[in-house]
């Protein structure tokens, strides 16, 4: 009898059913669309970050940059003694390479990796050492061969003869300063970290057998610009490395996390940073435990900076950042307001319907219907109206998602990173800048927004439909249950 009465009431009150269902449908459709686009934007942010931090990297650990201490060699300054270089025909040829930690990096003990790996909830972790290689090569006039003694501050003294050596024969000089980034990493830890975000272009990747060897993998774009190829060699910190392969980014951005990749132990030795690292990349056992794992790691390493993907996403700039802010602010509040309006409409129409059915409920009570049965009847009608609205809302939301995916809007984003650059006359590294200066680089990535459809979004829609129906039904049923049979029959005369 419940079903028969329910169907009859819904049919007899088509207008109320249609209005409530449409209001609920629009609200739920908007919620589905906003949630789906938000998930698409998060995926786009992960695409921008993947070339820098690696696919599947949930957490990164580093330490804030510290001011250089006395006696250190920040930025890879070159030191030439009186006997440096080879002199011939009044010209001294100099060539020197330095491999140092960037000014923007602070190294810490690699024992922290063991602490991270032993933390509950950590699935995988690997450490890296970010370095900058700077090479000075050039020809300078030999001051001693020309009789120049030099005055105060290096200026020519009275009676000094002008230098006649040098490449141009007139005492001039020519030199080149070149810079590129080097990343030392565990060759066997490619499942997490920067190398997990690359694809092999030529040759091979580093493997566990490369530990302790002078083998290197190059970013394919850098290799092309520097006229280097697999099978060739590259000088890093004064040591000749064999190029065993080149890699390219798996995203639309053509740049990977570094110009050159070498084994971590070799990088530590060449840069005089034995037992030191600059970053740790972590994958959590489950996506739902990232925040709790990050909190545990911060407790275990109080001096470290622990950042999750959500924290890193805040560094993404461009139209992607604008879209993210729009969704997190306007989109969320718009969804809440529309949903609240839909619930309010459902409640008001249900109460209005109960008021118009005063005689009906009085009669039902007079023939023995209990308050519980009347409440369940009204609640049942409201839930069905909510489910109808939910079903229509799912269709509306899915149509909206399809339209977004067909349009496929493009968003641009960049994750800025700061590296040491060594620009100068005749040469310069990535990012340019003054000699030994810190340069900020930001590789811009253009991504196509794709709004995914997940079971979770559908379940949210169904849950909202049921919740709206229950709220309206509970309030309307409570109003109907308060009616007394005699008063209800008397009110309609």
Image (cartoon, rainbow, N blue to C red):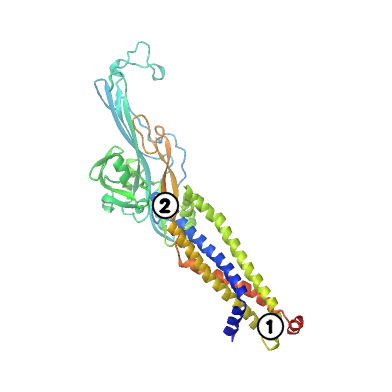
Q: What element carries label 1?
A: helix
Can residue 462 be seen by looking at this rendering? no
**Residue 293 vertical placement versus 366 (above, below):** above
| Nearer to the camera, 81 or 333 | 333
Return the residue at label 2: 447
Point 35% across, 30% down: residue? 79
Residue 266: percent from left, percent from top: 31, 45
Q: Is mark 2 on a helix, strand or loop?
A: strand
Residue 302: percent from left, percent from top: 49, 51
Residue 190: percent from left, percent from top: 33, 54
| Nearer to the camera, 446 or 136 | 446
Return the residue at label 1: 360
Distance between mark 1 and mark 2 Cα atoms: 60 Å
Point 42% across, 62% down: residue? 285
Q: Residues within 10 Å of mark 2 (few under 14, many from 20)?
A: many
**Residue 301 vertical placement versus 420 (above, below):** below
Can residue 151 be seen by looking at this rendering? yes
Q: Is residue 16 left or right of residue 240?
A: right
- The answer to the question of whether label 1 and label 2 lie on touching residues, with beta carbons closer than 8 A, is no
Quarter of the rendering occupied by the N terminus: bottom right
Q: In this view, does 261 lie to the left or right of 455?
A: left
Q: Is residue 263 left or right of residue 333?
A: left
């Amino acid at each position: 009898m419940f079903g028969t009465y329910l169907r009859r009431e819904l049919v007899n009150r088509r207008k109320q059913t249609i209005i409530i269902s449409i209001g609920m449908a629009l609200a739920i459709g908007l919620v589905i669309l906003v949630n789906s686009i938000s998930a698409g934007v998060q995926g786009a942010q992960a695409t921008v970050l993947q070339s820098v931090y690696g696919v599947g990297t949930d957490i990164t650990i580093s330490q804030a940059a510290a001011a250089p201490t006395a006696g250190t060699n920040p930025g890879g300054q070159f030191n030439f003694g009186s006997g440096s270089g080879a002199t011939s025909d009044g010209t001294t040829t100099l060539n020197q390479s330095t491999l140092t930690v960037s000014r923007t990096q602070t190294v810490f003990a690699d024992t922290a990796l063991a602490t991270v790996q032993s933390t509950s909830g950590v699935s995988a972790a690997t450490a890296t050492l970010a370095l900058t290689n700077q090479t000075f090569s050039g020809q300078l006039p030999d001051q001693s061969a020309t009789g120049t003694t030099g005055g105060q501050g290096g200026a020519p003294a009275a009676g000094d003869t002008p230098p006649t050596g040098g490449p141009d024969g007139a005492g001039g000089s020519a030199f080149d300063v070149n810079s590129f980034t080097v990343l030392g990493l565990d060759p066997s830890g490619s499942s997490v970290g920067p190398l997990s975000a690359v694809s092999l272009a030529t040759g091979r990747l580093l493997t566990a057998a490369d530990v302790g060897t002078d083998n290197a993998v190059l970013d394919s774009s850098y290799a092309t610009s520097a006229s280097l190829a697999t099978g060739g060699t590259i000088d890093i910190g004064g040591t000749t490395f064999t190029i065993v392969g080149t890699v390219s980014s798996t995203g639309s951005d053509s740049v990977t996390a570094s110009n050159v990749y070498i084994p971590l132990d070799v990088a530590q030795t060449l840069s005089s940073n034995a037992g030191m690292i600059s970053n740790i990349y972590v994958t959590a056992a489950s996506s739902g435990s990232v925040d709790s794992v990050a909190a545990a790691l911060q407790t275990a390493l109080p001096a470290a900076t622990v950042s999750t993907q959500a924290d890193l996403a805040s560094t993404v700039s461009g139209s992607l950042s604008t879209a993210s802010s729009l969704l997190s602010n306007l989109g969320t509040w718009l969804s809440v307001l529309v949903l609240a309006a839909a619930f309010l409409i459902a409640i008001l129409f249900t109460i209005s319907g109960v008021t118009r059915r005063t005689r009906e409920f009085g009669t039902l009570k007079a023939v023995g219907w209990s308050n519980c049965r009347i409440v369940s009847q009204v609640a049942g009608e409201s839930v069905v109206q909510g489910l109808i609205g939910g079903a229509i809302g799912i269709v509306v939301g899915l149509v909206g998602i399809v339209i977004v995916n067909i349009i496929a809007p493009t968003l641009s984003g960049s994750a800025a990173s700061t590296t040491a650059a060594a620009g100068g006359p005749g040469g310069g590294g990535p990012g340019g800048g003054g000699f030994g200066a810190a340069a900020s680089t930001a590789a811009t990535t253009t991504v196509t927004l794709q709004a995914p459809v997940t079971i979770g979004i559908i379940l949210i829609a169904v849950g909202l439909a049921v919740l709206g129906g229950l709220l309206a039904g509970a309030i309307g049923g409570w109003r109907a249950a308060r009616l007394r049979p005699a008063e209800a029959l008397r009110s309609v005369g």
